Amino acid sequence: MCAAAPGGGGRAARRLRAATAGSRVPSAAPRYSRRTRKVPIAYEAEPRPESPGPKWEPENWRQQLERIREMRRHRDAPVDEMGVDKCYDTNAPPQVMRYQVLLSLMLSSQTKDQVTSAAMLRLRQRGLTVDSILQMDDATLGQIIYPVGFWRNKVKYIKQTTAILKQNYGGDIPSTVEELVKLPGVGPKMAHLAMNIAWNSVSGIAVDTHVHRITNRLKWVKKETRYPEETRVALEDWLPRDLWREINWLLVGFGQQTCLPVNPRCKECLNQDICPAAKRF
């Protein structure tokens, strides 16, 4: 599950951010529609109404956050070495880099970072561009990306999305969350990460299974949430916006190393004494 490093990563990410300045592609409405979601997706252009009275925030969250930062200071989780910001060709033109960022995000769903990184490397060895994917037959594409999760569906989505990008965006990727989530195989988490990495725009919090699980364990949501998109809305309601870029990278690595889905390593966690979930494990 790829994530973005806080601040957008290193030299390659800074180069991509600099190249994207002033290069947004004019909007065009893709022809594909997606299934109705259980939770409506709120886009970055929509202002949030202010709630009357004091703003809710979880107990001890700042202390918990600082301790997680301390546990993540070595940056040695899989996401740090094989995250999306490490998957694209740093020498490619900006438009190609943005396309590769989107593809790595599509491949990362339900897939370990190590597997996504290896699949992206194989694709890049063949010259990963919009045109190269359109010219590649489905069987060959499937052989290259296997064994990413749901690889057969991803072959279909990649080909459909790439055709849309070629036809409607001149081979670039959309520059808004609203347009990104209309692409086949692209969900809200991918869209917000794509905005962050490819367009250097913080449009929202990217919530994957790690962020969803950990924020519920820490009770960083008013009430338990069932879906990542519910979690994103709940977090954005109180978490300061200047933390939105960092939180995905921080919690994904923390979830890979310490706050595991099964048998979390609570005895190794600096938050053991102030984590609401610690006593359950």
Image (cartoon, grey):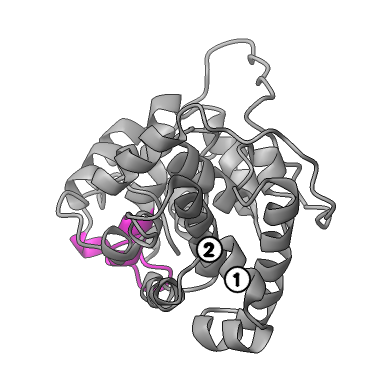
- Of the 4 image quadrants, the one containing the C terminus is bottom left
Q: How many marks?
A: 2
Residue lying furthest left: 74
- Residue drawn at x 26%, y 53% is 272
Q: Nearest the camera: 56 or 231?
A: 231
Question: Which numbered tag is attached to residue 133?
Answer: 1
Q: In the image shown, does 193 or 118 lie closer to the viewer?
A: 118
| Extreme residue in the top direction | 53
The boundaries of the magenta stretch are 252-268
User: Is residue 261 magenta-colored?
Assistant: yes
Q: Residue tagged by mark 2?
A: 129
Q: CB under 8 Å between callouts 2 and 1?
A: yes
Give coordinates of residue 115: x percent, y percent: 41, 78
Q: Secondary structure at mark 2?
A: loop
The amino acid type, in three-letter code, at marker 1 is Ile
Q: Mark 2, residues whose alpha carbon is within 10 Å: few (<14), some, or many (≥20)?
A: some
Indicate the secondary structure of the residue bearing disc 1: helix
Task: Classify 126 as above or below 233.
Answer: below
Q: Amino acid at mark 2?
A: Thr
Q: Is residue 55 above or below residue 131?
A: above
| Residue in view at x 38 percent, y 42 percent | 16
Horizontally, residue 226 falls left or right of residue 143, namely right
Q: Is residue 165 left or right of residue 99?
A: right
Is any atom of residue 81 visible in this view?
yes
Residue 22, how many percent across, how many down?
50, 26
Answer yes or no: is residue 240 visible: no
The residue drawn where x is 69% and y is 55% is 166
